[in-house]
Image (cartoon, grey):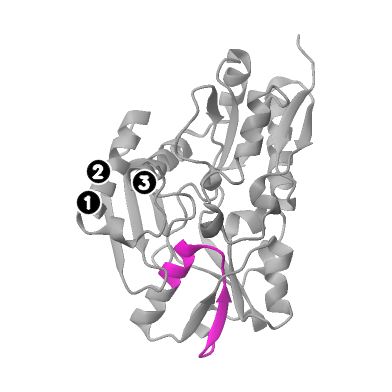
């Protein structure tokens, strides 16, 4: 029996280490092998520029993939929403575990809800997607808010609220839950208000395609419903030729009748960051049974969105 320690490549942030630690425990359970975390600094971790300025696509991933390709780590854990939609031939996403809560949340002063924020409230987010949808909602509901671009880890972002510099910040529910800070959420943003990023709340466990034994072992952690949902979402993103930091939201819901999953609904949105122009569409059909089926669903919805002018609303196009 092989009991050699497996090396898991991870970013150094508190969130990355928390989610990688959880995956390490699961991998150790299914393989019977110890797992050590190998901390790797990515360009996205050290740059202080806004993601839209540094390109967004792959800035949190490239260094981890380089370490995989060089054999410095055996597998890596990514936040799926950070993963470029183009997959290198030498690497494979061996598992997409069950998804956490995909919603965005706000942490606001005085425990305020989003719709209770005062006139002129300043809301911090580094995401053009969040800005576009929050501003669109505010315009359509007569809310007077200002979205403010910010960067930084969870402590830094929430610190802007605690210091009074901002009235609220927007974060991902999954991230706060994974680091045990879900109790700081003051409001959950409905996906009808803000669609999450494609793949938000899900993790990707990636390894070398040629390591068949490890691929098979990691595959035991794969959740098929999560896999098909995020595949459809990321197919939409790819077909729009949009990068990770483009103002694109997508969510695939599995619609159930009692305990039986009947259909999948895929929703997509693209908008200008000021919220003045939006294209938002959805499609519902049988749950795709194959990777190709999920990909086709995403491409079909993307084609409808492009036909309604989505291409002109994205500040960044990925090629």
What label sits on residue 304 in the rendered view?
1
Quadrant in the picture for residue 176: bottom right
User: How many neighbours does mark 3 have within 10 angstroms: few (below 14), some (14-19), or many (20 or more)?
Assistant: some
Q: Mark 2 = which residue?
A: 300
State how far apart marks 1 and 2 are (Cα).
7 Å
- The reply to whether residue 258 is visible in this rendering is no
Q: Are marks 1 and 2 in contact (CB under 8 Å)?
A: yes
- Tell which of 285 and 238 is nearer to you: 238
Quarter of the image for the C terminus: give it: top left
Q: Name the front one of labels 2 and 3.
A: 3
Q: Residues within 10 Å of mark 1 (few under 14, many from 20)?
A: some
Q: Secondary structure at mark 2?
A: helix
Q: Is residue 318 visible?
A: yes
Identify the residue under disc 3: 241
Magenta residues, start to end: 117-134
Residue at image x 20%, y 54%? Answer: 307
Does dot 3 land on a helix, a strand or a loop? loop
Tell me whether circle 2 and circle 3 mark residues in contact (CB < 8 Å).
no
């Amino acid at each position: 029996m092989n009991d050699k320690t497996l090396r898991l490549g991870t970013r150094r942030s508190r969130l990355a280490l928390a989610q990688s630690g959880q995956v390490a425990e699961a991998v150790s359970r299914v393989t019977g092998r110890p797992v050590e975390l190998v901390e790797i600094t990515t360009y996205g971790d050290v740059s202080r520029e806004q993601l839209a300025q540094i390109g967004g696509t792959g800035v949190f991933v490239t260094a981890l993939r380089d370490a995989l390709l060089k054999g410095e780590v055996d597998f890596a854990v990514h936040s799926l929403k950070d993963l470029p939609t183009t997959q290198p031939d030498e690497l494979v996403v061996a598992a997409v575990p069950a998804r956490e809560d995909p919603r965005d949340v706000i942490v606001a002063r005085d425990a305020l809800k989003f719709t209770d924020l005062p006139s002129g409230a300043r809301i911090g987010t580094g995401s053009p997607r969040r800005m576009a949808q929050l501003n669109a909602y505010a315009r359509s509901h007569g809310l007077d808010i200002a979205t403010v671009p910010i960067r930084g880890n969870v402590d830094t972002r929430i610190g802007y609220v605690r210091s009074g510099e901002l009235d609220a910040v927007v974060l991902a529910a999954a991230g706060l839950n994974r680091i045990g800070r879900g109790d700081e959420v003051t409001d959950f943003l409905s996906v009808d208000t803000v669609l999450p990023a494609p793949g938000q709340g899900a993790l990707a466990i990636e390894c070398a395609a040629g390591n068949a034994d490890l691929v098979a072992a990691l595959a035991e952690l794969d959740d098929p419903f999560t896999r098909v949902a995020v595949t459809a979402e990321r197919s939409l993103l790819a077909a729009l030729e949009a990068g990770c930091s483009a103002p694109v939201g997508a969510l695939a819901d599995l619609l159930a009748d009692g305990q039986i999953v009947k259909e999948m609904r895929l929703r997509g949105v693209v908008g200008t960051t000021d919220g003045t122009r939006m294209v938002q569409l959805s499609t519902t059909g049988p749950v795709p049974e194959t990777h190709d089926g999920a990909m086709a669903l995403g491409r079909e919805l993307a084609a409808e969105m492009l036909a309604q002018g989505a291409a002109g609303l994205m500040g960044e196009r990925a090629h």
